[in-house]
Amino acid sequence: MKILVIGSGGREHALAWKLRQSPRVSQVFCAPGNAGIAGVATCVPIPASDHRALSTFARSEGIGLTVVGPDDALAGGVVDHFEEEGLRIFGPRQAAARLESSKSFAKDFMFRHGIPTADSRTFETSAAARAHCAKANYPLVVKADGLALGKGVVIATRYSEAEQAIREIMEERRFGEAGSRVVVEEFLQGEECSIHALVDGDSYLLFPAAQDHKRIHDGDQGPNTGGMGTFSPPSKLLSQEIEERIRTEVLERFLAGLRADGIDFRGMLFPGLMITASGPKVLEFNCRFGDPETQVLLTRLESDLLELLEATAERRLSKASAQWSPLSSVCVVLASAGYPGSPATGFPISGLNSVPTDTLVFHAGTRMENGSPHTSGGRVLGVTALGDTLEVARRNAYGAVALIQFEGRQFRTDIAAKGL
Ligand code: AMP
Ligand code: GLY
């Protein structure tokens, strides 16, 4: 079978790498891909937003399954379009992907179906949001309703900061239409945890958990990013009791909510959780694989990913199972100077060939120039290594990080340290 992966990040590199290992896959294509993805797939220069060109390509190439990486393609309805064209595709339709693309829609869904989450209110005007924040307790969290690359969330410690966030999001429209509403919510204290579960509407298949590091600097300092590094499993964070509560209070109620609301959700559900003193609470629903969570999860997956994605799309998940490596996996992201603001790019990347073969370097913002890889985005590489213990995996990942250079390279030195 021929596969098409849509997207161009480290997540898509990991998806293409894993799908190519399936004995049933003859060729993997990726649109548009990047310099590293070109090593495991045939890259085709079609942007993820051009749904018509993507479906035309899928039809002419005889693609058996298309796998969608990024949230904006899902929110833009790429799955609806492919299905209307009679093409097989993995991911939720636009109406279901609203659980990620509208935070107010997701909060409403959680409140109605008893899924634990922060108390919150949604505001349609900046005046109403200001009035609420003027008499609220701090800290509190102000969020743009729509997709904003993980940057539309502000933790305000006093009114002036909340006021500034409301102005930037709703009046200056820093994130465009994503700021037509704001969600103002209670600040939750705890440790964050990334949960992934394939969901086919009738049942779910829970992946091992992972932990991301959202802030740019060591010690969880500085602004939020898309994610600076991950590890799996986060054994210290998740007791059996917490995992059981995630199943019953989040995943089972999510499925019941889908049924009650008549939402056809087939795809990857990735709830971002805060593990608080009173249990797990959902910060947000993502309707796709996480980046860089996918890098650590797929390096631990021993089963055929194609089988799992097909079972999800065809509502056969209750009969599917997945085998996972007992090894630990750690992914350290190397980013460009300036990220998460304006990254400085265009620099040659050296040392990739000296990385040990059992360490995987998943590419994100890279591009070939004169036959050699150059930086082309904020997050550049996800250096991913396995080990018998988290400590060994971490040492292996950082050993490889030391071999790779590019101008302005920045990375966190404490990825997975909280798991030791
Ligand atoms: P979100 O896009 O809603 O997941 O928010 C992005 C990041 O902001 C999360 O990963 C958390 O680090 C932080 N965050 C969001 N909501 C809250 C909250 N209610 N309390 C504390 N931190 C939050
Ligand atoms: N790493 C977090 C995300 O993919 O949203």
Image: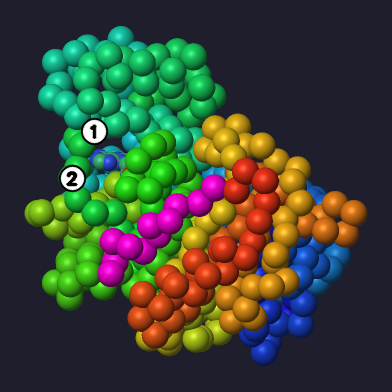
Residue displayed at 19% across by 29% down? 139
Task: Estimate the spatial distance between the alpha carbons at disc 1 and disc 2, rounded to whole Å.
Answer: 13 Å
Numbered disc 1: secondary structure: strand
Q: Position of residue 298 (x, y in %)?
A: 51, 74
Q: Is mark 2 within 8 Å of ligand 1?
A: yes
Q: Quadrant of the C terminus?
A: bottom left
Q: Is mark 1 within 8 Å of ligand 1?
A: yes
Q: Is residue 259 left or right of residue 199?
A: left
Image position of 274 with respect to 211: above or below: above
Any part of residue 38 in sight: yes
Residue 92 or residue 17, whichever sits in front: 17
Residue 416 highlighted magenta (yes or no)? yes
- Tell me where residue 120 sits by quadrant: top left
Image position of 232 with respect to 176: above or below: below
Residue displayed at 10% across by 54% down? 277
For disc 1, the marked residue is 185
Residue displayed at 41% across by 44% down? 217
